[in-house]
Image: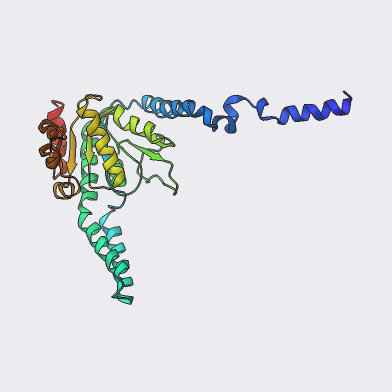
């Protein structure tokens, strides 16, 4: 090999992906065969950060991204009404107004989630304690309300974002050092449940249903710690899921109906949690 050939080959070696240090090789880490390692990293990154901040236990708050604060919901309704006024016979715009009115009617849950998170955080994070830390999916709507409630009383809260086809921004009320982004839904769900002392569920859609039934199944099968599952919005949820019908049909036990309870106020939900854990 001539000196020129040697120099050229050395340049190729130094540029070769194989020569990259493994932990700096993004292409290697993103490869299909490294999926188990990526899942382990997602588990460890949040786990170690929560340990570093001495977060010993959490209260999970789920709910719709679309149940926003009352002022924002009212603005959306007014925009929909203005569009309908231009074309009063347009069925799509009629539908948009009807949906916006329903969201406005549910905006009280934003305030309840905010009050609940403030109450829990103020009660449990005094003197440097990090118990019963509010944890949400980190997005808008009900999740924002819960993180906001903790923020407004000077307490920590956690947000677990997940990568989606459309961009998901974390809400601005999460403790910055406790805001995480996940690729794998499974790892995100694991962190929701791992330290949970309660699951509090507000009206929501597919995502909220998924998270609620995941927890109910784990509780039903005894595969997770005993925690209270508290549901806000009795009328909403009874229209969405007929739990009593499941029991009447024999597809769940009557005792499974005791796995969750309904609440109407922040104080009522917090008292249920305190009684469950004998505080």
Q: Nearer the viewer, residue 176 or 171?
A: 171
Of residues 14 and 239, which is closer to you in this image?
239
Which of the 4 quarters of the picture holds residue 60?
A: top left
Residue 64 spot, x, y in % from top left:
28, 48
The residue positioned 34% from the left and 40% from the top of the image is: 137
Q: Nearer the viewer, residue 139 or 215?
A: 215
Q: Residue at x 26, y 47 (%)?
A: 204
Residue 21 horizontal/vertical position (percent)? 62, 25
16 up-or-down from 243: above or below: above
Residue 243 at what x, y percent from top left? 15, 41
Can you see residue 108? yes
Taking 178 as reference, is 265 left or right?
A: left
Image coloring type: rainbow
Q: Where 84 sits versus 173, above or below?
A: below
Q: Residue furthest right?
A: 2
Q: How many marks?
A: 0
- Residue 153 visible to the viewer: no
- Residue 216 locus on image (x, y percent): 22, 33
Q: Quadrant of residue 251?
A: top left
In which quarter of the view is residue 42 placed?
Answer: top left
Which residue occupies 30% across, 52% down? 66
Q: Is residue 162 left or right of residue 14?
A: left
Q: Quadrant of the C terminus?
A: top left
Q: Quadrant of the N terminus?
A: top right
Position of residue 5 relative to residue 240, above or below, is above
């Amino acid at each position: 090999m001539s000196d020129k050939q040697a120099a050229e080959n050395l340049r190729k070696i130094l540029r070769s992906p194989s020569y990259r240090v493994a932990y700096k090789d993004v292409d290697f880490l993103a490869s299909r065969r490294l999926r188990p390692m990526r899942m382990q990293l997602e588990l460890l990154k949040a786990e170690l950060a929560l340990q570093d901040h001495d977060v010993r236990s959490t209260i999970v708050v789920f709910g719709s991204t679309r149940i926003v604060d009352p002022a924002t919901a009212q603005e959306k309704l007014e925009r929909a009404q203005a569009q309908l006024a231009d074309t009063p016979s347009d069925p799509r715009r009629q539908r948009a107004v009807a949906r916006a009115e329903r969201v406005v009617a549910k905006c009280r849950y934003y305030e309840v989630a905010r009050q609940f998170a403030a109450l829990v955080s103020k009660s449990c994070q005094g003197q440097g304690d990090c118990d019963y830390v509010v944890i949400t999916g980190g997005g808008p709507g009900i999740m924002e309300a819960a993180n906001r409630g903790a923020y407004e009383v000077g307490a920590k809260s956690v947000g677990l974002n997940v990568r989606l086809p459309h961009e998901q921004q974390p809400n601005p009320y999460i403790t910055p050092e406790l805001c995480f982004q996940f690729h794998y839904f499974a790892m995100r769900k694991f962190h929701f449940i791992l330290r949970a002392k309660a699951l509090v569920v507000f009206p929501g859609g597919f995502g909220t249903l998924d998270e609620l039934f995941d927890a109910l199944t784990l509780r039903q099968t005894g595969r997770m710690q005993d925690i209270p599952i508290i549901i806000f919005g009795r009328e909403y949820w009874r229209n969405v899921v007929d739990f009593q019908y499941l029991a009447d049909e024999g597809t769940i036990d009557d005792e499974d109906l005791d796995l969750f309870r309904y609440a109407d106020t922040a104080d009522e939900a917090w008292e249920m949690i305190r009684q469950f854990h004998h505080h």
